[in-house]
Structures are given as C-alpha cells and as structure tokens.
Amino acid sequence: MVDQLEGNPILQEVLGKAYEPLRMFHVKLEQEGEPRGLIGPRDVDIIWERHILNSAAIVPFIADNFGVTDWQTVQGTIADVGSGGGFPGIIIAACLPQASITLIEPMERRVIWLQEVVDELQLQNVLIQHCRAEEAVVPQHGFDVVTCRAVAPMRKLVGFTMPLLRHGGRLIALKGASIEQEIEKGRSQITKAKGVNPRAYEAPVGPGLQPTHIVMVDKR
C-alpha cells in the first residue's frame, strides 16, 4: 500500500532539511507502525499527512515562541508529553536539530520504539524519559515549551503539563476542531494551574491539505 503523498513535492516544501530523517521514520512506521499498535490500519497509506505533516504543523508555532523563523536555529528546551509513536516529539526533534527535546512516555513498549527511532534517525538532541508527566525530571527552572498531541482534554491536560514549564513558558498542543469549547470548559482548571491567555489557532498542514488546530497557554 503506497502512501497517498509519496513523492509529492509538498513533503520537501514543508519539511525542508528534516525531510530525509522523516522519510526514514515514514518507512519504519509503514513497516512496523500497525503491527506494533502505533497507528491504525486505516492510517497506513496516509502516514505522511495524518501523522508526520500534521505533527510538523506545530513547529512554526514553537519557532515563533523563540522569536525565529529558521527552524534550524531554534534553541531551548522542549518536553513532549505522551510521545507514543513519536507524534509530535520525533518530528519536532528532526525539524529543530539545535533544540533539546525530552520525550516523556509512560508505556514501556512505546519507549522501546522511541529509542529505536532516535537511534535509527541518529537524532542527537533527544532524551527519553520512561515515566508519567508528573514523575518527569525537569530542568532547574522548567522547560521553555511543552508539547503534546491528543493526550487529554484541556481541563486535565493543564494539570500535568503546566508544572513542567518555567515561569513564562508555553504549552503548545495539537488539538481537534472543538478546541474552543475545550478552552471554555477548562478555564477554571487552566487558571488554577497558573495558565494564562489560552488561545486557539488554525495550523496549516500543507498546500491543499486539511489544516489542524493548535492551542497555546502561557504560564504565569
């Protein structure tokens, strides 16, 4: 089964220098993703769009957080919570080679997968922590950015992500189309977790492709 975007120039247009390592990641996902329970059977021919480009949609928002447009120059500390199959953490690491990426994942079989991917893609900027977010080892002043994709509704998500952030740090999460309602339902929990200014954005995935959604919350 051939991926619908295989060979499409959109891939290199969107991913730039990250295309080559992410092409290797795509091959591994295509061969092992479904049998190892990391993607569903209906995702096998849409891995590029549904998982890799969808995850990459978060990268410009991270770069903007650091005040740069060139992904290759982004520096800082980023924690990806519930990394699972590597979405978006592996994609972020490939796109931002100068940033320090920590993947936080509680399930052992997924940790094994993530380590295999890091080794095979030769990602030098990744640390994997086998634990829940609440148990993670955090830099002295906290992470600059915390990311995640489809981990929990906002009212729960802020409770275990905001403590990982430094003062002035930012949660940047990939979300579904109902994110505005999630924000409204979770406002009291966001405030309690020291979160401020929750806002949602439509995030381009690629020319002609369905956009995704991003939520950002700052930590006071």
Image (cartoon, helix red, strand yellow):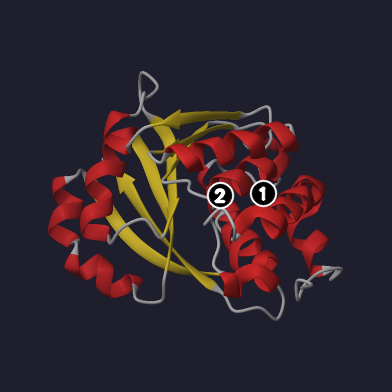
Q: Which secondary structure, mark 2?
A: helix
At horizontal 59% and vertical 61% (from top left) the residue drawn is: 34
Q: Residues within 10 Å of mark 2 (few under 14, many from 20)?
A: few
The earlier-in-sequence mark between 2 and 1 is 2
- Estimate the x, y position of residue 146 in percent, counting from the top left: 42, 42
Q: Are marks 2 and 1 in contact (CB under 8 Å)?
A: yes
Q: Nearer the viewer, residue 119 or 147?
A: 119
Instruction: From the image, tell me which residue sits under label 2.
Output: 64
Image label count: 2
Q: Which secondary structure, mark 1?
A: loop
Does residue 213 lie above or below 121 as drawn?
below
Instruction: From the image, tell me which residue sits under label 1.
Output: 69
- On-image quarter of the N terminus: bottom right
Q: Residues within 10 Å of mark 1 (few under 14, many from 20)?
A: some
At horizontal 40% and vertical 22% (from top left) the residue drawn is: 139
At horizontal 76% and vertical 54% (from top left) the residue drawn is: 27
Q: Nearer the viewer, residue 65 or 79?
A: 79
Label 2 and label 1: CA atoms lie apart by: 7 Å
Query: In the rendered structure, which amino acid carries the disc numbered 2?
Result: Asp
Q: Nearer the viewer, residue 51 or 220?
A: 51
Residue 88 visible? The answer is: yes
